[in-house]
Image (tube, rainbow, N blue to C red):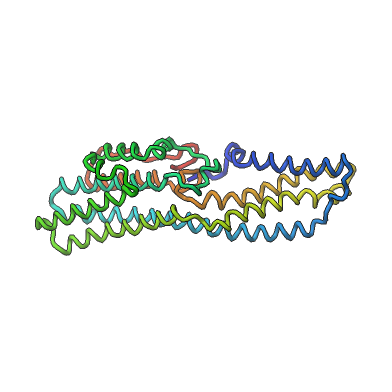
Amino acid sequence: MYTGKDFKFRLLWHFARKNLFRTFIISAIAVVLYKIFDCKFLAIPFLPIGTIGTAVAFYIGFKNNQAYDRLWEARRLWGGITNTSRNFTVQLIALVEDKTFVKETLYRHIAYINILRLQLRKTIPWATSKENLHQTFSGERNELEEFDAGLKKILEENNKMQHYEEVKGKNNAASGILKTQILQLTKLKRENKIDDFEHSDLVKHINELFNLQGGCERIKGTPLFRQYSIFSRVFVLLFIFLLPYGFLRAHNALADWGVWLTIPFSMLISWVFFTMEQIGEFSENPFDNAVNDIPISTICRNIEIDIKELLNETDLPPKMNPVNDVLL
């Protein structure tokens, strides 16, 4: 998630350079054909082009609202995971006298949220990262490419390697960890270390985590309807292609050299439309580990710190800070 107050020129240039180059070529061709080769018939009235531009702007706005809803829902789901983790931690500490069991269970929970993080950041066929529209700022890409290696690393860090063979190679390793949590709590109840009501209260938190995880998986696995994504791109390209031809006659009337103003004005307006269209693309998959995505690595670290503080541990991991104004 980008945390800077303003976008730096380097970041703006990264996203704008290809589009500016394309629109320069398109507008330059139009001007050269009109001015050098005297193809005056290419000049068309601006009114129909302006009408198309207005319709495209409304269409992109609707698409971007849908994409933003997905982004905001993803943030709410991870806020729910944070709150449920705290509630589960406090209740487990209060109800269970076996401190070894408490610590093992909570360290297993830390492993769970980090495994879920890796699962959500797997590359999927429709993800925009495959089109290089996103800039990844994290070294976690190796974990994404080798999920089992990342899984093993997380379990080693939390002293839970006994679960590696249980979840290795499974499509949903995070659910496997939650299953183990319920089995361990049920075992505790059978040993009469907690009663039925306490067991029910603790299992409710695990069930809530299942629900929140399911919400994240729904966003990850279901793209924004393809007609919105595909046709918004088609409409923007159509508008950008026609735009310089609508400027030719008006700019040529300003002065003998005025027609050349078509190029910078076309580039500027086209960049605005391209940027509006890409904002929706960037927001569509909020778990893609990109500049403007949900910082789930930071959220996982904050949950880990909260849990260890509640366990009265002093050896806490450092908080994650933005790198180049990007919070991972």
Q: Residue at x 38, y 53 (%)?
A: 78
Asked whether, in this view, residue 302 is left or right of residue 132, the answer is left
Query: In the image, residue 267 lies at what x, y percent?
Result: 72, 44
Q: Seen in the image, is 34 located left or right of residue 214?
A: right
142 relative to 272 in the view: left or right: left
Tell which of 272 and 220 is nearer to you. Answer: 220
Picture quadrant where residue 34 is located? top right
Q: Residue at x 27, y 58 (%)?
A: 205
Residue 169 % position (x, y): 32, 43
- Classify residue 104 as left or right of residue 172: left
Q: How many marks?
A: 0
The single residue placed furthest to the bottom in the displayed view is 197
Classify residue 216 by image quadrant: bottom left
| Residue 92 at x, y percent in the picture | 20, 54
Which of these two is toward me, 305 or 184?
184
Q: Quadrant of the C terminus?
A: top left
Task: State the residue in front, 281 or 264.
Answer: 281
Q: Residue at x 23, y 54 (%)?
A: 90
